[in-house]
Image: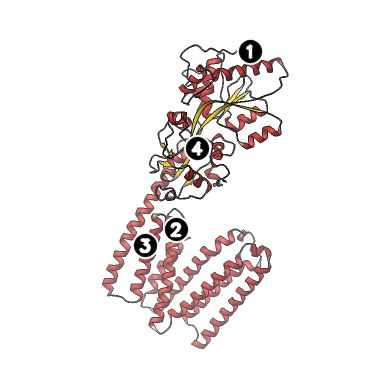
């Protein structure tokens, strides 16, 4: 439809300046028709979309905008073609105008007392739009006055409107970010202004007969040529950016098979010496967050009997699972796991345990950094804690507001029960977190990483845990932001100078044992936790890539 409008406008412009009176009138008629179509597209379509307009057009008032638009077009055509003498012409114009005024008044009156109509605010939308159309009809009248100055003023106003709408249509539909013409936060916004000024300038030169024909052609060429070059450059660059969006890599999560405890060439770390603990009998059922699986797989490798421990298959004989944060917690609550490894527990999960009368026991076993990251080509390198809060509360929506460039900040998030989202909530405290569009919430951590690494690279922001991005993904496509000028190094995590350094936990539930097997499994769980806090266990924490506790029993 946009191309159709543009073709109509160009055709009207060409014909409107023909010396042949009939062709000129055809051109003016086309311009009026195009203007009214743009009006309906820009103002009415959006309002009626919310009411399923085409789904129910039997209600009379829904046709009123069509009737009024056709009435305005009829007035314009009467003035342009002058089928009657002056007296009959103005009687016709006044009758049509009066009928539309009555429709407007009735529409507003009905809208005030019809609840469903009033709730859609259409009574408020119709008033300014209809007033604008009435003014447009008067301007058309000016265009065909015998007084050349009045006519030229009217024509200039019409072409100013047409140029403006043409520029807006181009901006909204071709040049992201959308509606940049309102905020001028992007090159596209200023290109919209350039399109408007160039089109309007060319029209003014021809309407007012400024300079000779040759000079006007030269000026038009000088205005149009750089505009075309700029337009092609912006659209071409945006096309290039869109092509980047397709290079997303896989959205699948990390392949945990590579870390299984006794897999050949496993990536799970080994002790430098025989383990001081070898568990026998009923072994603890382990589960946890994806980012911690390499660590507790290493624990199992050191203390469990050699066997196949599949990370994904929830079978009785597979004792070292990775169900991810939310499911792992549910498994613990439902007594399908004995020991889980998480970065933290949300308030909702604490409440869930309390409602079931269960007591959670969280044992810190190491330290990790919660990090914020951007694409390597993003100029940002540091954010303050306050800036993080402003961004995720919606107070800061442009990198300029946090001192880093001049682009919209695209904020990605994780589901509420994910470990990383729990950490973000802890950082935000009582400050509400914005609700992002559904497509900006990634169920898999790798999906958020891909979004920042390959998509929207100039303005997106993601978060995760240091080990997961640095060691498990290890693609070097993003950079970690320092917080308050402090980088997430092992030293800064260990001494707590990095603002978002946190403990992670081995989590159990204190239960009454009903069978000997349960009692043995609980005893082995306690032994395993004690061993994890021993020098051997803490050495595996460090070897895996996390920061061990400074003090441990």
User: Hey, which quadrant is residue 52 in on the image?
Assistant: bottom right
Which circle, 4 or 1, is nearer the viewer? 1
Residue 283 visible within the image: no
| Label 2 SS | helix
Q: Which of pointers 3 and 2 lies earlier in the amino acid sequence?
A: 2
Alpha carbon distance from label 2 to label 1: 68 Å
Please tell me whether residue 527 is drawn above or below residue 28 in the rendered image. above
Disc nearer the start of the sequence (4/1): 1
Q: CA distance from mark 3 to mark 4?
A: 39 Å
Is the residue under label 2 in contact with that under label 3 (CB below 8 Å)?
A: no
Q: Residue 421, image x and y in percent?
A: 55, 38
Quick one: label 3, few (<14), some, or many (20+) residues within 10 Å?
Answer: some
Quick check: marks 4 and 1 in contact, CB under 8 Å? no
Q: Is residue 185 left or right of residue 49?
A: left
Q: Are marks 4 and 2 in contact (CB under 8 Å)?
A: no
Question: Which sits earlier in the primary sequence, circle 2 or circle 1?
Answer: 2
Q: Which residue is mark 3?
A: 194
- The label on residue 447 is 4
Q: Is residue 389 above or below residue 62?
A: above
Count residues near mark 4 (Cα–Cα under 10 Å), then give few for <14, some for 14-19, many for 20+.
many
Q: Secondary structure at mark 3?
A: helix
Residue highlighted by disc 2: 183
Q: Is residue 385 visible?
A: yes
Nearer to the camera, 514 or 492: 492
- Which of disc 2 and disc 4 is earlier in sequence? 2
319 and 495: which is toward the camera: 495
């Amino acid at each position: 439809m946009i191309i159709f409008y543009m073709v109509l406008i160009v055709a009207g412009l060409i014909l409107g300046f023909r010396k042949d009176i009939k062709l000129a009138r055809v051109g003016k008629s086309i311009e009026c028709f195009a203007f009214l179509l743009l009006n309906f597209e820009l103002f009415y379509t959006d309002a009626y979309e919310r009411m399923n307009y085409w789904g129910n057009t039997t209600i009379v008032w829904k046709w009123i905008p069509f009737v009024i638009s056709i009435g305005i077009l009829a007035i314009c055509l009467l003035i342009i073609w002058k089928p009657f003498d002056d007296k009959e012409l103005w009687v016709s114009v006044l009758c049509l105008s009066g009928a539309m005024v009555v429709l407007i008044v009735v529409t507003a009156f009905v809208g005030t007392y019809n609840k469903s109509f009033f709730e859609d605010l259409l009574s408020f939308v119709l008033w300014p739009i209809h007033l604008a159309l009435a003014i447009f009809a008067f301007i058309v009248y000016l265009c065909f006055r015998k007084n050349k100055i009045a006519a030229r003023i009217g024509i200039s106003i019409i072409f100013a409107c047409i140029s403006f709408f043409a520029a807006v249509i181009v901006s909204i539909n071709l040049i992201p970010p959308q509606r940049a013409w309102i905020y001028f936060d992007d090159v596209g916004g200023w290109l919209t202004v350039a399109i408007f000024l160039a089109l309007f300038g060319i029209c003014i030169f021809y309407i007012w007969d400024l300079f000779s024909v040759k000079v006007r052609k030269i000026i038009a060429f000088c205005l149009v040529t750089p505009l075309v070059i700029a337009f092609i450059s912006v659209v071409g660059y945006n096309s290039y950016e869109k092509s980047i969006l397709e290079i997303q890599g896989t959205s699948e999560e990390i392949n945990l098979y590579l870390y299984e405890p006794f897999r050949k060439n496993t990536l799970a770390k080994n002790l430098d010496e025989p383990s001081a603990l070898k568990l026998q009998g009923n072994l603890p059922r382990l589960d946890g967050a994806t980012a911690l699986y390499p660590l507790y797989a290493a624990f199992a490798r050191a203390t469990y009997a050699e066997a196949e421990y599949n990370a994904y298959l929830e079978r009785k004989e597979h004792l070292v699972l990775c169900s991810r944060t939310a499911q792992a917690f549910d498994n613990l609550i439902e007594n399908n796991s004995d020991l889980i490894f998480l970065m933290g527990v949300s308030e909702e999960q604490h409440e869930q345990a309390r409602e079931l009368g269960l007591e959670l026991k969280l044992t810190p076993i190491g330290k990790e950094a919660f990090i914020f990251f951007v694409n390597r080509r993003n100029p940002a390198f540091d954010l303050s804690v306050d800036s993080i809060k402003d961004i995720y509360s919606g107070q800061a929506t442009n990198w300029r507001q946090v001192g880093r460039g001049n682009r919209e900040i695209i904020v990605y998030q994780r589901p509420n029960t994910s470990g990383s989202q729990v950490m973000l909530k802890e950082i935000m405290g009582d400050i509400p977190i914005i609700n992002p569009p559904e497509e900006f919430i990634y169920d898999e951590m790798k999906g958020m990483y891909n979004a920042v690494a390959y998509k929207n690279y100039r303005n997106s922001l993601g978060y995760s845990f240091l080990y997961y991005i640095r060691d498990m993904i290890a693609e070097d496509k993003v950079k970690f932001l320092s917080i308050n000028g402090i980088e997430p190094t092992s030293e800064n995590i260990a001494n707590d100078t990095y603002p978002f350094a946190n403990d992670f936990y081995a989590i159990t539930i204190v239960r009454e044992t009903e069978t000997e097997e349960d009692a043995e499994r609980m005893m082995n769980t306690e032994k395993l936790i004690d061993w994890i806090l021993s020098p051997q266990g803490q050495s595996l924490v460090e070897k895996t890539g996390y920061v061990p506790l400074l003090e441990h029993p």
